Amino acid sequence: MVNKKHILAIIIFGFLVYSNTLKNPYLWDDGLFIQNGNFIKKFENAKVFFSPKNYFKYTQDLTYRPLPFLVHMVNYKIWGVNPVGHRLTNIFLHIAVAILLYFLILEIFKNNIVAFLSGLFFVVHPASTEVVNMVSFLETQLSTLFFLASFLFYVVAAERSSAPRSKDNALRLHVFSVVSYFLAVFSKETAITLPAVIILYDLTQSVIARSGGDEAISNEIATSPDGHRGSRNDIIKKYLPFLAVGIFYLIVRFFIFRHPTETMVKYPGDSFITNVFVILKAVPIYLSMIFLPFNLSVEHNIKIPTTFFQTPVIFGLLTAIIFSVISIYSYKKSKPVFFWLMFSAITFLPTSNIIPMQNIVAERYLYLPLIGICILLALLLKKISSRFSSVPILLFSSVPILLYFSALTVIRNLDWKSDFVFYSKTLEQVPDSPGINSTLGLVYARYKNYPKAFELINYALKLDPEMLDGQGALASIYQDKGDYDKALALYEKMVAEKKYTYHKAPFFNLGIIYKIKKQYNRAIENFNKAIKLNPLLSVSYAHLAEIYETHDDIEKATELYKKSVEINPDDYIPLNALGILYSQKNLQDDALKYLKKGLKLKPNSVEINFNIGYAYYLSYRYGESLKMLEKTLKLDPNYERAKFLISQIKGKTE
């Protein structure tokens, strides 16, 4: 029976350990996809989900994951780009996963304590901090939520299928399970493992349910949902929909919507054997994340082992052997332990680098496998307390673990409070990471500490002379300093050698520099190239509009400003520009429409306040004009044009 107090406790702990993330800014990929990402700002952009030609250009993503973008679109509709709202969604999704885990374990074991501890340990575990703190990693929680929902529907359907009166309801739940699986894989590819999980569950489920998590169990194997051996047709009907969804997804993912750069990712050392050594070397890192999560990091710079005879590789192999021995032993002695060990192994497999991945090790790869670990921990504590028939022992053993995980999660969240703190801490952990040195260099450049910025980026290029983003980072600092010739030379070299990443192509920056140099044809050429790579790059349209406005092509300029506003309604600059253009055409109502929209975005803009006052003046609405002009002077007492207009109004009204 559901214990509402347990659910409430999971919600409270989940919110408490992550409440200190709400004021954190956007970091890492959040800038690309959320803060400056225009794709999520219009639901109509979702049409590219069905266009292999346009999906990657419009979303700027490297993987086909359409459903998370829909959630981001809803978030944007509610919160705009306010990070607090987006972070709330991430926290609520994480708590929802923990609650769904509670219901799943309660359904399987019929044991409130095991269900409660499983959900509680999961919601506070520090290994999930990367996923919860990164708004753009929402796909991990979303996929896990649908994964668990599918599994839960399947388990309930299996139970009800044995009761004649509930068969229709069981069929409906089975359909819900398949639909949830479909949603899971199109949220993130790691959910592909669910069919293997449910087949394994069916092979062990009758004894798992009977055990209640307390006793070693027999070798009884069930191959049908009601615990009896089913016919071949029954088995096909049960599993075929899941397999069909999985195969359909794999076809879509690898043959229809596959980003070209994925084929460029190779095994470490371009060798499968070396890759096996790397996987083994990663084992101690993942164990540390689970059991000793003191020094969590978003970057793990693994040196590629050239031989088996390295301590981390040997340790990884020994761990794999021990895991295999425990799994075999548990298969004979305790099916629940065996199942959840296998659950963690199976769900981790897609991110283990069996298929080459850009990031060999990452905390987010543990999000789904961590569920199995938390359940095993709950089973262990319940087993200990049952042996002694003692509730105090259960409390004595579970509370320290809960506090241990919770404290480390709260502390880890502090590392995300600013870009400077975040990247500085990461650099302390991986000082020889070219990517982090380069990124922190750009942070220093934003604070105008150019010597430190150059030091870090040059060191990044020394570590990896072929690092594509490093050259772009160096060029952007020269550009920020106003040394346009050096920046231009670097950008043009990147283009000539085709050495730039998909997200950081230099064409937009080339357009800016050529525009500053008044080489307008070359500026237009590069802005158009930037738009070709990213059709939703609204600032490119705005800069093109400024060029056409400079050449008195007002109609073209107006069209491009409107395009910029249509793509990104949060940019006040083109709104202000449109207001000025319409005011010059003596279309003051249209001018005011755009200017007022700009004012909502930038209420303390001296220029927009003045332009509204001027539009009112040209409309002979002197009272409203005077009000806006006086506000302009409050913002900038030395704004001479406002003073002049005020004197004109007073001359006309006295």
Image (cartoon, helix red, strand yellow):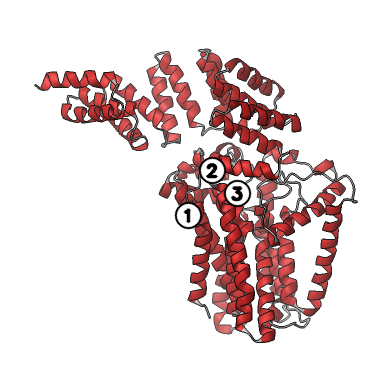
Q: Secondary structure at mark 3?
A: loop
Residue 488 in sight from this viewpoint? yes
For the residues labelled 2 and 1, the Cα–Cα distance comes to 18 Å
In front of the other: 393 or 201: 393
Position of 43 relative to 142 (above/below): above
Q: Residue at x 37, y 30 (%)?
A: 575
Give the labeled residue for mark 2: 418
For badge 1, the amino acid type reads Leu
For badge 2, the amino acid type reads Ser
x%, y% of residue 333?
79, 79
Give the labeled residue for mark 1: 88
Which comes before the other along the chain, label 3 or label 1?
3
Checking the image for residue 65, the label placed there is: 3
Number of residues whose C-alpha sits closer than 10 Å to that of mark 2, classed few (under 14), some (14–19) or many (20 or more): some
Camera-side mark, 3 or 1: 1
Query: Seen from this angle, which residue lies furthest left?
Result: 654
